[in-house]
Every structure is written in structure tokens, then in C-alpha cells.
Image (cartoon, rainbow, N blue to C red):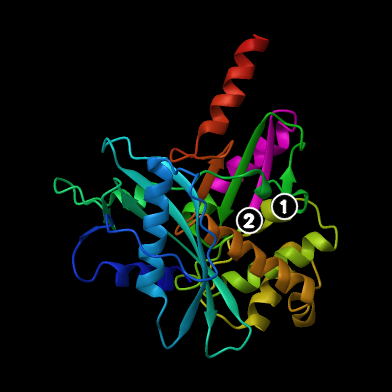
Amino acid sequence: MRLMSKLLIATLLTASSTVSIAWAKESPKKDEVVTKTTKLTQDQKTQKRLLEYVKRAISVNKDYKLKGISIRQVKDVKDLPGWKVYFLDIDLALLQQKGKVITVHDKIFSNGKYIVRDFINIVNRSSLKDKLVPDMDDSYYRKDHLLYGSEKAPNKIVVFSDPICPFCQGYLPKLLKAAKENPDKIALYYYHFPLIMLHKEAPTVIKAAMVAQKQGVKDVMQKVYDAKFNMDTDDEKKILAEFNKKIGTKITLKDIHAKDIEKHYNMDKEYADKMMISGTPTVYFNGKKDFSRNKYLEVIKKDDKKKK
């Protein structure tokens, strides 16, 4: 879905890397209600023009049809005065799969007159688009994803992780331990995000972990990260045999393909896609992306100093 997202937005700017959205006003459609007394702010005008532009650019395609488009969030671009980044939710009906609708998420820049897809730093060749991410809303603080801590804890941490990812294997055990030991300070919410192109065993390991949690096995994710399932295979039987051996479970193929497990697995991917997650581990601290991944340590150290 992330690939489709990139392809869609790429079609918007094929003619030029910078596009003007300042056009003449259109005549209203027959079924459109026009309120003459309503005056739009400059920001509202920009958003309306931006949506109309994107709508026109992707409304005709043999593979999908545009169902709707909305701006979920808008942020000022600190390094570029007057420019904003717009986070888009694009609903598409897949024409080859009747009744199938997907939501693609992307971002685009505008200063009210021009639209650009990205800004590239010519010194270090970094993408500004990659650095700007949406803030997280409270819908991610789901009780069924709370791994450790209290829902009333003042600090909410949401992590997207892949248990086969070497960076996750080095980072997650420390975060899990800290959250478990500080339930009054930290609420840790965990979302699975398998990097399938790199880790073929990830889906099976993740689903097995879900089943183990469902069966009441304690500290499942801690045990999974400690076990380090680096098998480089997608053979579910082999992976499950190893999982059962290391975790001490008796999980079957039928268990990992149960409807509730598949639903949980797919939901995690949808939640990750909405936040435009592309790598692991990705950490959000109180609704903001924690690029350092270490803000939880500041909370613990701060409280430790108070006690002294």
C-alpha cells in the first residue's frame, strides 16, 4: 500500500516538480449548494484548491476509482516559512475487486500558490518529506494493545516493531523492561509491523506471538525478542516448531490462521500505514514521533532524581 501511495502522488507532478494551484473559480455543479455569505479563510481556500487538484489528477484510472479524499492533518514546515505539509487520506475503490475499498495515505507541500511533492537538501541529499510525520491521536491507545503499564499513566508510548529486525532485537528488550518496571509512569502500546521483504519468517512469528498472548502466556514479546527467531524461511511448520520449542507453547497452523488473529494482524498493518510507518522500530512518545527513541529514559531518570 505504501508503494501504491508513492505511485499515486507521483502521477500528480509528472509535468513539473512545482505546480500552481491558483486557478479561476469554477461554476458550481447542479447538485452543489452555494452559500454566498460564507467566506473562506486563506487556509481553507488553499485546502480546497489542493483537494480539487489531487482529485482531478487521480480520478481516472483503469485500476481504481477515487471515492474520496481528505486532509487529516496540516503542519507548518519550520525550515520553509510560508510552506505547509498536508497529510492526505485517499479512499480508492479497486475496479478489479468489486466492493474493495482501500485508503492510501500520503503527504504533499503547498505555500498557497504552488504544490510540490518534496524538498531535497542539496547538501546532504536528504528528503524533507521523509522527516515530516503526522502526530498520533488517542485512537492508538487501544486497551488490547497495551503491553505494560496503566492506561492512566502520564506518558503514552506507542511502538511499531518487527521481532526479526536486528535493531528491534537490540532496542525492544530495554523498552519492555523499563515499561514493565514503571507502570505508573509509562503506558506501552505495541503494534506489529513486519518487514516482510526482509524477514520472511516475521508474519508467522508475529501471529504465533498473538496466539500465545491470547492463551495467557506471560511476557510473550519479551520472550520472543530474547529468542531471536532469525530463520530466513517462510515455512510456517518449521517456524512454528522452533517457536513452540523456544517459548514452550503448542501452537498449531490452525491457531495462527484463526479469524481473530488474522484480523489483529491486518489491523496492526492498517494502523501503521495510517501513520506512514516505513521502518522499525518506530516510536511515538505522547503523540509525537520520538526520533531519538530514548524519551522514556528521560522520564525514568527524572523521577529517580526526584526520589533522591
Judged from the image, the secondary structure of the residue bearing numbered disc 2 is: strand
Q: Are marks 1 and 2 in contact (CB under 8 Å)?
A: yes
Residue 282 in the image, given as x and y percentages of width and height: 50, 50
Would you name the residue on which mark 2 appears? Answer: 191
Please name whichever residue, 209 or 257, is drawn nearer the observer in this view of the structure: 257
- Please report the residue visible at 68 percent of the width from the left and 54 percent of the height from the top: 221
How many angstroms separate mark 1 from mark 2 (CA)? 7 Å
Q: Is residue 273 left or right of residue 191?
A: left
Identify the mark nearer the N-term, 1 or 2. Answer: 1
Among all residues in the image, which is located at the extreme right?
216
The span picked out in magenta is: 171-190
Q: Amino acid at mark 1?
A: His
Judged from the image, the secondary structure of the residue bearing numbered disc 1 is: helix
Label at residue 7: none
Residue 305 in the image, given as x and y percentages of width and height: 60, 13
Among all residues in the image, which is located at the extreme front?
36
Among all residues in the image, which is located at the extreme bottom?
96
Q: Amino acid at mark 2?
A: Tyr
Q: Is residue 180 magenta?
A: yes
Instruction: Please identify the quadrant where the C terminus is shown.
Output: top right
Residue 180 in the image, given as x and y percentages of width and height: 72, 38
- Please report the residue visible at 55 percent of the width from the left and 42 percent of the height from the top: 284
Quick check: 179 above or below 222? above
Residue 99 in the image, given as x and y percentages of width and height: 63, 84
Among all residues in the image, which is located at the extreme top?
308
Would you name the residue on which mark 1 appears? Answer: 145
